[in-house]
Every structure is written in structure tokens, then in C-alpha cells.
Image (cartoon, rainbow, N blue to C red):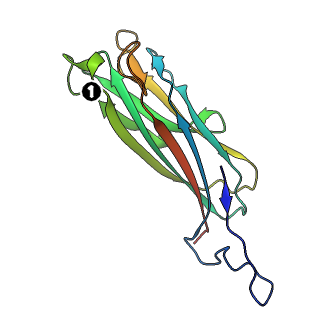
Amino acid sequence: MAITLHGTRADNTDILTPDFDGAIIQVVQSTLTTGATSNSNTYATTGLNLDITPSSTTNKILVHCNFGWSSNTADFGFYCFGVNSTADTGTQTTVFNQSATNANNSIYFCTLTNLFSPSSTSLQNYALFFKCNNAPTQSVFFNQRGIGGATGLSTITAYEVVAW
């Protein structure tokens, strides 16, 4: 759901649409309660994504994601944002499963945040992508605990920020 603030001043300009740098003028959030599995070293979508349309080509989009993950080994998983269906490896974060013994029984929670400059007023799609470090012997589980394990609630939130 997008939230856009509006109002009117005496001089017929928007009162609540901030005209100062760094103001947040739109917020969009999406949630996901299903899981995904990968045993590939190629980025794939987790299914967690959202659409936002910037109101100005100079504004920026701050994207923040909270998610759970696990692995079947004490190994690495890689997560990154995708922009308009393409993985952006410049936003990559590496997450490490701490315990091979309890790998399928544990879920680890992570946060990934990045500030994008789309330079566009066209719809932008932001998504979370993931891959394995040690494919095909490793499996990485997004938003779930092991194969067929309990799932969590993951969120992705985009904030349109007035350019500075």
C-alpha cells in the first residue's frame, strides 16, 4: 500500500508534501509468509518484492528488508536486491550459518538495506534474491527453517526520499 501525503497551503502548494531534502514522501511495504529453497550458485528470486513509482527523477528510494533464512550446512548464503528483475550484486550481503549440527532446525534473521537512485518516474520493482555459496551440496532456505520447516514473516519496505 502506497501512502502519499497531501494538503494545501494558503499559496496553493501542498502543505504535507515536504519540500525539504531527506523527507519521506511515500512508503510501500510487502510481506511474504512462504518459503523458497535454492541449491544453485546463480541468483534466484525469493518471491519477496514490491513496486514503487518515484514522483521525481531526482528522488531516491531507500529499500529495507527483514527476512529469515537457514541452510543445511554451516556455510554461506548470499542475498541481494534485484531491481526490475535483475540481481544487483552491488547490494550483496553474505550471511553465515553458525551451526551445521542444528542447521535445519534453526532460522537466522537478517536485515538488508540500500539507497537507490532510479533517476526515473517509471515504476520500479525491488526484490530480494538469493543463492548458495557451496552449490549443489548446500541448500539455502529463504524464510523457512530447513526443508519443509516452519516459515516466518519477511518484509520489504521502500521509502521515497526527497533528493538532497
**Of residues 159 and 136, the one drawn nearer to the viewer in this rendering:** 159
Percent x, y of residue 101: 18, 16
Percent x, y of residue 91: 47, 43
The quadrant where residue 66 appears: top left
Q: Amino acid at mark 1?
A: Asn
Kindly identify which residue carries mark 1.
97
Q: Residue furthest top?
A: 137
The quadrant where residue 105 appears: top left
At a point 46% along the width and 17% down the height, the residue shown is 38
At a point 65% along the width and 53% down the height, the residue shown is 118
At a point 75% along the width and 56% down the height, the residue shown is 121
Percent x, y of residue 14: 74, 78
**Of residues 88 and 140, the one drawn nearer to the viewer in this rendering:** 140
In the image, residue 5 sits, relative to residue 76, either above or below, namely: below
Q: Quadrant of the C terminus?
A: bottom right
At a point 47% along the width and 28% down the height, the residue shown is 130
- Count of picture labels: 1
Task: Please rate how many residues cluster around mark 1, counting C-alpha atoms within 10 Å: few if below 14, some from 14 to 19, many from 20.
Answer: many
Q: Is residue 98 left or right of residue 36?
A: left
In the image, residue 87 sits, relative to residue 64, either above or below, namely: above
Percent x, y of residue 8: 76, 81
Query: Could one spot residue 163 in this view of the protein?
Result: yes
Q: Residue furthest right?
A: 12
Secondary structure category for the residue under label 1: loop
In the image, residue 131 sits, relative to residue 50, either above or below, namely: above
Q: Is residue 25 left or right of residue 104?
A: right
Q: Is residue 107 left or right of residue 47?
A: left
Q: Residue furthest bottom?
A: 10
Query: Could one spot residue 73 in this view of the protein?
Result: no
